[in-house]
Amino acid sequence: MIKVKLCHKKILLVLDDVHDLDQLNKLVGEHDWFGLGSRVIITTRDAHLLKHKVDGTYEAEGLDYDEAFQLFNLKAFKQEHPNEDFLELSQSYVRYANGLPLAIDILGSFLLGKSKDEWKSALDRLKEFPERKILNTLKISFNGLAKPEKEIFLYIACFFNHTDQDAIIEMLDYLGLYPKIRLSVLKDKSLIKWQDNHLWMHDLLQEMGQDIVHQESPEDPGERSRLWLCKDIDNVLTKNTVRGADWNLESFSKMPCLKFLKIDGVHLMHDLKHLPESLRFLECSEYPLKSLPSNFPSSKLVKLCLNYSYTEQLWKGKKSFKKLKYIQVNWSEKLIETPDFTKDPVLEKLDLEGCINLRKIHPSTSVLKELTLLNLRGCINLRRLPNKFEMKSLEILILSGCVKVKRIPEFRENMDRVSELYLDNTNITKLPTSIGNLTSLASFEYKRLQKSYVPS
């Protein structure tokens, strides 16, 4: 009927807040539904819908500071300039809103006619309890997400805002969330943005996400799905001060769904022997003990990061990590040798940069079929490498600064994926003829260190 009635008429059609492709199909159809010169304007929270129908798109940007300041004053004072006594407070509110017209409108309207003390009190309250009306409006887009996208949004809001794009994708992949396709959904809905290879979300969207987690259990942090504030973590693990780290680590055993654990800037006094089997990612800087406990959870762990640790050996004997893909133990000065990796079939990255007392690499390293990165940069006391390398997936091998390494292992025929090889500042005197097997080599650095620089 729309096509029959309007196909010869020049019309202006505005469709506001479209959220389903079926709406466009029924109301817009094809270009010949309307007469020449017609215009159809569509607004939506989901840019992906527009890819099916429109000739051009425009993404509404946030207000710049001057525009935001003017709008705020019109709402709070009914004029373009604030009262002089309120100038600094007005500027603080505008910075808080960070260009979001919705927040500026709601805050300015709320403050109209209120005293200076009330303005100050409201600003202090915002720092701990965001304006509910703003959050509820922003939450509309969140509510329309599928469950996995909601999970990714909350991870970003609580942990990963303003983080490198590749690092976030890697992390979310470790958590089993298939991030590449799902992050594009969040981007289409303007819930996140990419800038200079960094992912970020608006401060108020981040507050909204954190508030969603907080509302899971306002009074008991232990019942929430995510913890990121020191006071809440400390509340769950102990009643002592967080810097003391005299935590009751048995509390971890009561977290059967724990997947992501990051401990940074805290000196632990006890071993991590009560972690649940659900754990997929562990980062613990300055880990205090000589090795991981014998009952350390291994069935689902994907990434292990123990930078600046006091570990001498990651684990003793053979330990089965069937899903472990990434080990990073950078700048761990006590580390002496790598463990037996025989039962770690999917290990992809082994990063041991700056382990200055590392003496030898276990022979099992040389046959890791999925290993793509072996980084031994700055391991100045490393002497023993395996007799041969046959890691068929290896792409990057770094031995830069391994000043006591005098011989490079033979490269087997299956190592045709190596694209980067760094042998600078070593004492390797001769390259094996098998280097010819590295048929994909694109970046190669080889500069022998002068003898006078070799440490005793």
Image (cartoon, rainbow, N blue to C red):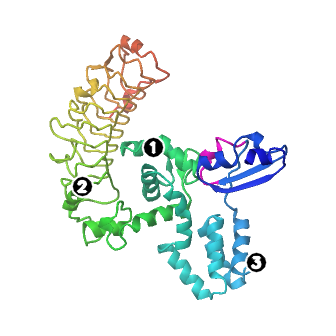
Q: Secondary structure at mark 3?
A: loop
Whether residue 343 appears in magenta in the rendering, the answer is no
Q: Residue at x 66, y 66 (%)?
A: 101
Front residue of this view, candidates 124 and 363: 124
Whole-percent x and y of residue 418?
42, 22
Q: Which residue was labeled with disc 1?
A: 179
Q: Is residue 374 left or right of residue 46?
A: left
Q: Quadrant of the C terminus?
A: top left
Amino acid carrying label 1: it is Pro
Is 67 in front, or is 37? 37
Residue 229's tag is none
Q: Which residue is mark 3?
A: 81
**Kind of residue at disc 2:** Pro
| Eye-nearest disc, 1 or 3 | 1
Classify residue 410 by image quadrant: top left
Mark 2 vs mark 3: in front: 2
- What residue lies at 65% left-to-right and 76% top-to-bottom? 108
Mark 1 vs 3, N-terminal side: 3
Looking at the rendering, the stretch of residues picked out in magenta corresponds to 44-54
Find disc 2 in the rendering and name its residue.
256
- The reply to whether residue 166 is visible in this rendering is no
> Residue at the spot x=29%, y=27% of the render?
368
